């Protein structure tokens, strides 16, 4: 439920008032606009009961799964083993993202041009996961965008960019609108640079969730850039983060792995689960999310998609799909 509707819940307003009385600060509604009323109410009650101030990583430390840590930890290597079994290279599509995270950890600072490239490539990649065409044409794409020269991109005819991208088959259904919005989006990025000193300082200071909110509908709203695109952009400049998807919501829900009680996990539950799996396996959440996503996607390993290939899956013992007699392999 969107944040615009959040105050319609009768129970919420008294909790917001009580939160202020106890913690002496206003609850940051803007930071939880992607959550349902029920989830916000739960957070408020916990904050009030424990007399703590909400922070962006608050939900991460809560007990959000029905599995114990041992089982939750085991799921991730078994997912990789499932893809190894069919000789699927799950690292192929994420090598660049992994290297970007490593570079940032080593102290790399990304320039304005690199941030702009990350945003543009995130947009071009819409609905193209597992498609190597963009990666194989990266040098040509760099030339089309004049190495992401903001002054050129603010004045170039968007149709020129679209035409050149179509020649190399690197467009998507929203490409016209994306290119038309490019000039205005660059001006927003310039405003962020002015406010923070650089885009790199911006992504270091603000949390991924707050950046996604600001890009989606907040202070620095970008046209054609939703929360998912914001997370993709952040990954491409080396920020170790993760995002939700319909595939992960289904996988973690009660009809599949049953990590949560609901049929489909919420956005926050997906993020919590990915973060926790990453901690338990001592690896980056960006890698965990990307690998599990490939486990599900039709264009990738396609093991636990809409129509599961249970015969290929090594995590069947955790899955409710076969327990409900839906899986012919496990009957």
Image (tube, rainbow, N blue to C red):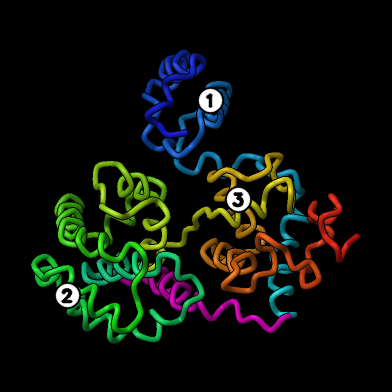
Which of the numbered marks, if any, corresponds to residue 41?
A: 1
Label 2, label 1: how far apart the Cα atoms are: 49 Å
Q: Position of residue 321 (x, y in %)?
A: 79, 54
Q: Position of residue 187 (x, y in %)?
A: 14, 56
Asked which quadrant contains residue 46, the reply is top right
Element assignment for label 3: helix
**Along the viewing direction, whichever of 53 and 64 lies nearer the viewer:** 64
Q: Is residue 324 above or below residue 123?
A: above
Sequence-first disc among 1 and 3: 1
**Which range of residues does the magenta coloring cover?**
86-109
Q: Please check the rendered image and state whether residue 67 is part of the magenta-colored stretch, yes or no.
A: no
Residue beneath disc 3: 249
Relative side of 265 to 175, left or right: right
Residue placed at 30% from the left, 86% from the top? Answer: 139
Residue beneath disc 2: 160
Q: Position of residue 193 (x, y in %)?
A: 18, 56
Residue placed at 60% from the left, 50% from the top? Answer: 249
Which is closer to the viewer, label 2 or label 1?
2
**Along the viewing direction, whichever of 276 and 218 lies nearer the viewer:** 218
């Amino acid at each position: 439920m969107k944040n615009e509707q959040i105050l319609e819940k009768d129970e919420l307003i008294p909790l917001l008032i009580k939160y202020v009385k106890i913690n002496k600060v206003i609850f940051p509604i803007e930071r939880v606009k992607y959550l349902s009323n029920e989830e916000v109410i739960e957070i408020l009650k916990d904050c009030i009961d424990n007399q703590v101030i909400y922070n962006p990583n608050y939900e991460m430390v809560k007990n959000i799964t029905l599995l114990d840590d041992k089982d939750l930890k085991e799921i991730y290597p078994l997912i990789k083993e499932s893809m190894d079994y069919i000789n699927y290279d799950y690292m192929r599509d994420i090598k660049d993202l992994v290297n970007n995270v490593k570079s940032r950890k080593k102290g790399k600072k990304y320039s304005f041009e690199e941030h702009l490239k990350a945003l543009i490539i995130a947009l071009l990649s819409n609905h193209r996961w597992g498609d190597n065409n963009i990666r194989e044409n990266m040098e040509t794409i760099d030339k089309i965008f004049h190495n992401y020269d903001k002054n050129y991109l603010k004045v170039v005819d968007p149709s020129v960019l679209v035409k050149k991208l179509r020649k190399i088959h690197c467009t998507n259904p929203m490409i016209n609108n994306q290119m038309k919005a490019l000039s205005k989006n660059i001006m927003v990025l310039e405003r962020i640079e002015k406010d923070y000193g650089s885009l790199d300082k911006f992504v270091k200071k603000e949390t991924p969730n707050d950046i996604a909110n600001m890009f989606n509908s907040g202070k620095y709203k970008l046209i054609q850039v939703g929360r998912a695109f914001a997370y993709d952009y952040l990954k491409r400049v080396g920020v170790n983060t993760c995002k939700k998807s319909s595939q992960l919501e289904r996988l973690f829900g009660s009809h599949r792995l049953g990590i949560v009680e609901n049929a489909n996990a919420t956005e926050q539950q997906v993020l919590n689960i990915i973060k926790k799996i990453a901690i338990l396996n001592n690896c980056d959440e960006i890698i965990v999310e990307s690998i599990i996503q490939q486990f599900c996607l039709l264009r990738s390993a396609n093991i636990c998609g809409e129509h599961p290939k249970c015969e290929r899956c090594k995590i069947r013992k955790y899955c409710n799909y076969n327990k409900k007699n839906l899986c012919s392999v496990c009957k």
